[in-house]
Amino acid sequence: MLTRPFSLKPLCLAALLCAAGAAQADITVYRSESAFLAAVSAPGVDSFDDLSAATPYADTLYRTAGAYTYQAYSTGGLWGAGGGGDQWLSNTFQTAPIVFSGFSPGVTAFGGRFFATDVFGDYLPAGNLMLTAVDGTALTYSLEGAATDSFLGFVSDSALYTVVLGANGGEEYWPTANDVVLAVPEPTTYGMLLAGVGVLGLAARRRQAPAARAAA
Protein backbone atom coordinates (compact mmCIF):
# COMPACT_ATOMS: atom_id res chain seq x y z
CA MET A 1 0.00 0.00 0.00
CA LEU A 2 1.41 3.38 -0.98
CA THR A 3 0.92 6.47 1.12
CA ARG A 4 1.62 10.14 0.62
CA PRO A 5 5.17 11.13 1.64
CA PHE A 6 4.01 11.85 5.20
CA SER A 7 3.35 9.63 8.20
CA LEU A 8 0.23 10.08 10.30
CA LYS A 9 -1.11 7.83 13.05
CA PRO A 10 -3.88 5.65 11.58
CA LEU A 11 -7.24 6.04 13.26
CA CYS A 12 -10.24 3.77 13.24
CA LEU A 13 -12.97 4.87 10.84
CA ALA A 14 -16.32 4.10 12.45
CA ALA A 15 -19.87 4.14 11.24
CA LEU A 16 -19.30 5.13 7.62
CA LEU A 17 -22.69 4.05 6.46
CA CYS A 18 -25.02 4.38 9.44
CA ALA A 19 -28.60 4.60 8.21
CA ALA A 20 -31.29 5.92 10.52
CA GLY A 21 -34.90 4.77 10.59
CA ALA A 22 -36.84 2.51 8.33
CA ALA A 23 -38.09 5.21 5.96
CA GLN A 24 -37.34 4.51 2.33
CA ALA A 25 -35.85 7.55 0.62
CA ASP A 26 -35.12 8.09 -3.05
CA ILE A 27 -31.73 9.30 -4.30
CA THR A 28 -31.27 10.52 -7.87
CA VAL A 29 -27.83 10.54 -9.50
CA TYR A 30 -26.83 13.40 -11.82
CA ARG A 31 -23.87 13.38 -14.21
CA SER A 32 -24.89 16.77 -15.63
CA GLU A 33 -24.05 19.74 -13.40
CA SER A 34 -26.69 21.93 -15.05
CA ALA A 35 -29.41 19.31 -14.47
CA PHE A 36 -28.27 18.92 -10.85
CA LEU A 37 -28.43 22.67 -10.23
CA ALA A 38 -31.87 22.85 -11.84
CA ALA A 39 -33.15 20.24 -9.38
CA VAL A 40 -32.03 22.08 -6.22
CA SER A 41 -32.21 25.46 -4.55
CA ALA A 42 -29.60 27.83 -3.03
CA PRO A 43 -26.44 25.82 -3.89
CA GLY A 44 -23.19 26.58 -2.07
CA VAL A 45 -19.72 25.61 -3.34
CA ASP A 46 -16.49 24.70 -1.53
CA SER A 47 -13.54 25.09 -3.94
CA PHE A 48 -10.79 23.98 -1.48
CA ASP A 49 -8.60 26.78 -2.82
CA ASP A 50 -7.64 27.70 0.74
CA LEU A 51 -5.70 24.41 1.01
CA SER A 52 -2.02 24.12 0.10
CA ALA A 53 -0.70 21.64 -2.44
CA ALA A 54 1.35 18.65 -1.23
CA THR A 55 0.37 19.44 2.36
CA PRO A 56 -0.95 17.04 5.02
CA TYR A 57 -3.94 17.99 7.17
CA ALA A 58 -5.69 16.52 10.19
CA ASP A 59 -8.08 13.60 9.76
CA THR A 60 -11.09 15.95 10.11
CA LEU A 61 -11.62 19.32 8.44
CA TYR A 62 -14.63 21.53 9.19
CA ARG A 63 -15.69 23.23 5.97
CA THR A 64 -18.23 25.65 4.54
CA ALA A 65 -19.95 25.61 1.15
CA GLY A 66 -21.78 28.90 0.76
CA ALA A 67 -24.27 29.13 3.62
CA TYR A 68 -23.80 25.46 4.61
CA THR A 69 -21.36 23.69 6.90
CA TYR A 70 -20.07 20.13 6.76
CA GLN A 71 -17.01 18.09 7.65
CA ALA A 72 -14.60 15.89 5.71
CA TYR A 73 -12.89 12.94 7.39
CA SER A 74 -10.35 10.30 6.41
CA THR A 75 -8.45 7.84 8.58
CA GLY A 76 -4.79 8.86 8.75
CA GLY A 77 -5.34 12.39 7.51
CA LEU A 78 -6.45 14.50 4.59
CA TRP A 79 -4.17 15.90 1.91
CA GLY A 80 -3.99 19.08 -0.15
CA ALA A 81 -3.67 18.11 -3.81
CA GLY A 82 -3.67 20.03 -7.08
CA GLY A 83 -1.77 23.27 -7.61
CA GLY A 84 -1.46 26.32 -9.80
CA GLY A 85 -4.27 28.13 -7.98
CA ASP A 86 -6.69 25.20 -8.22
CA GLN A 87 -6.45 23.19 -5.01
CA TRP A 88 -8.20 19.86 -4.35
CA LEU A 89 -9.01 17.71 -1.33
CA SER A 90 -7.49 14.23 -1.17
CA ASN A 91 -6.27 11.89 1.58
CA THR A 92 -3.04 10.40 2.93
CA PHE A 93 -3.86 6.69 2.75
CA GLN A 94 -5.24 5.41 -0.54
CA THR A 95 -7.29 2.65 1.10
CA ALA A 96 -9.06 5.05 3.47
CA PRO A 97 -12.15 6.72 1.97
CA ILE A 98 -13.05 10.36 2.43
CA VAL A 99 -16.30 10.74 4.37
CA PHE A 100 -18.38 13.90 3.99
CA SER A 101 -20.91 14.34 6.80
CA GLY A 102 -22.28 16.74 9.41
CA PHE A 103 -24.25 18.64 6.78
CA SER A 104 -26.31 21.67 7.80
CA PRO A 105 -29.97 20.83 8.52
CA GLY A 106 -32.08 20.56 5.38
CA VAL A 107 -29.25 19.68 2.99
CA THR A 108 -30.55 17.04 0.59
CA ALA A 109 -28.14 17.46 -2.33
CA PHE A 110 -24.40 16.84 -2.62
CA GLY A 111 -22.27 17.01 -5.74
CA GLY A 112 -18.85 17.93 -7.06
CA ARG A 113 -15.93 16.86 -9.18
CA PHE A 114 -14.40 13.56 -8.14
CA PHE A 115 -11.31 12.01 -9.73
CA ALA A 116 -8.02 10.29 -8.93
CA THR A 117 -4.59 11.70 -8.12
CA ASP A 118 -1.16 10.12 -7.79
CA VAL A 119 1.17 10.04 -4.77
CA PHE A 120 2.22 13.64 -5.44
CA GLY A 121 -1.35 14.93 -5.67
CA ASP A 122 -1.35 15.33 -9.46
CA TYR A 123 -4.33 14.31 -11.61
CA LEU A 124 -4.32 10.67 -12.72
CA PRO A 125 -6.84 9.78 -15.48
CA ALA A 126 -6.80 6.01 -14.89
CA GLY A 127 -8.44 5.92 -11.47
CA ASN A 128 -11.84 4.37 -10.74
CA LEU A 129 -13.89 5.71 -7.82
CA MET A 130 -16.89 4.63 -5.82
CA LEU A 131 -19.27 7.09 -4.16
CA THR A 132 -21.99 6.13 -1.68
CA ALA A 133 -24.74 8.51 -0.55
CA VAL A 134 -26.65 7.70 2.64
CA ASP A 135 -29.97 9.27 3.66
CA GLY A 136 -31.65 6.41 5.53
CA THR A 137 -30.96 4.17 2.55
CA ALA A 138 -27.67 3.91 0.66
CA LEU A 139 -26.92 4.30 -3.04
CA THR A 140 -23.49 3.48 -4.50
CA TYR A 141 -22.25 4.78 -7.86
CA SER A 142 -19.05 3.71 -9.64
CA LEU A 143 -17.16 6.45 -11.48
CA GLU A 144 -14.55 5.20 -13.94
CA GLY A 145 -11.70 7.27 -15.37
CA ALA A 146 -13.17 10.60 -14.27
CA ALA A 147 -11.59 13.84 -15.49
CA THR A 148 -11.03 16.90 -13.32
CA ASP A 149 -14.09 18.56 -14.88
CA SER A 150 -16.40 15.53 -14.57
CA PHE A 151 -19.40 16.15 -12.32
CA LEU A 152 -21.38 13.76 -10.15
CA GLY A 153 -24.23 14.73 -7.85
CA PHE A 154 -26.82 13.11 -5.58
CA VAL A 155 -30.24 14.60 -4.85
CA SER A 156 -32.39 12.96 -2.18
CA ASP A 157 -35.98 13.50 -1.08
CA SER A 158 -34.78 13.56 2.54
CA ALA A 159 -31.77 14.88 4.46
CA LEU A 160 -28.37 13.41 3.62
CA TYR A 161 -26.28 11.85 6.40
CA THR A 162 -23.03 11.01 4.66
CA VAL A 163 -21.38 10.74 1.26
CA VAL A 164 -18.39 8.38 1.07
CA LEU A 165 -15.71 8.74 -1.63
CA GLY A 166 -13.26 5.88 -2.09
CA ALA A 167 -10.95 4.26 -4.62
CA ASN A 168 -12.59 1.36 -6.44
CA GLY A 169 -9.67 -1.03 -6.73
CA GLY A 170 -6.11 -0.06 -7.61
CA GLU A 171 -3.31 0.70 -5.17
CA GLU A 172 -1.59 3.64 -6.82
CA TYR A 173 -4.20 6.40 -6.91
CA TRP A 174 -6.07 8.40 -4.34
CA PRO A 175 -9.70 9.63 -4.27
CA THR A 176 -9.86 13.40 -4.73
CA ALA A 177 -12.65 16.00 -4.63
CA ASN A 178 -13.03 19.53 -5.94
CA ASP A 179 -15.82 22.14 -6.09
CA VAL A 180 -18.10 20.30 -3.67
CA VAL A 181 -21.70 21.57 -3.87
CA LEU A 182 -24.30 21.41 -1.09
CA ALA A 183 -27.91 22.45 -1.64
CA VAL A 184 -31.46 22.23 -0.32
CA PRO A 185 -34.63 21.17 -2.17
CA GLU A 186 -36.63 23.39 -4.48
CA PRO A 187 -38.78 25.82 -2.42
CA THR A 188 -42.01 23.90 -3.02
CA THR A 189 -40.42 20.60 -1.99
CA TYR A 190 -38.77 22.23 1.01
CA GLY A 191 -42.14 23.57 2.15
CA MET A 192 -43.63 20.10 1.94
CA LEU A 193 -40.76 18.71 4.01
CA LEU A 194 -41.27 21.37 6.69
CA ALA A 195 -45.00 20.67 6.73
CA GLY A 196 -44.28 16.99 7.24
CA VAL A 197 -42.01 17.78 10.18
CA GLY A 198 -44.79 19.94 11.66
CA VAL A 199 -47.31 17.11 11.38
CA LEU A 200 -44.92 14.72 13.11
CA GLY A 201 -44.38 17.23 15.90
CA LEU A 202 -48.14 17.67 16.36
CA ALA A 203 -48.64 13.92 16.48
CA ALA A 204 -45.91 13.63 19.12
CA ARG A 205 -47.59 16.28 21.29
CA ARG A 206 -50.93 14.50 21.00
CA ARG A 207 -49.33 11.24 22.09
CA GLN A 208 -47.71 12.94 25.06
CA ALA A 209 -50.81 14.81 26.24
CA PRO A 210 -52.77 11.78 27.59
CA ALA A 211 -49.69 10.60 29.45
CA ALA A 212 -49.20 14.04 30.99
CA ARG A 213 -52.84 14.24 32.10
CA ALA A 214 -52.61 10.76 33.61
CA ALA A 215 -49.47 11.73 35.52
CA ALA A 216 -51.23 14.87 36.86
Image (spheres, grey):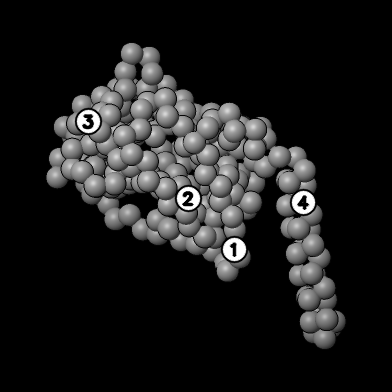
Q: Which residue is mark 3?
A: 118
- Residue at figure coordinates x 42%, y 41% from the top left: 72
**Would you say 201 lies left or right of 175 here?**
right
| Dot 3: element | loop
| Dot 1: element | loop
Q: Which residue is mark 1?
A: 24
Q: Quadrant of the N terminus?
A: top left
- Residue at figure coordinates x 65%, y 37% from the top left: 40
Residue 159 is situated, as x and y percent measured from the top left of the image, at 60, 51
Residue 1 visible to an observer of this rendering: yes
Q: Which mark is residue 2?
A: none
Q: Which mark is residue 133?
A: 2
Q: CA distance from mark 1 to mark 4?
A: 17 Å
| Dot 4: element | helix
Instruction: Identify the mark nearer the N-term, 3 or 1.
Output: 1
Q: Which residue is mark 4?
A: 192
Q: CA distance from mark 3 to mark 1?
A: 38 Å
Query: Looking at this rendering, what residue extends furthest in the top direction?
Result: 84
Depth check, front residue: 31 or 136: 31
Residue 68 is situated, as x and y percent measured from the top left of the image, at 58, 36
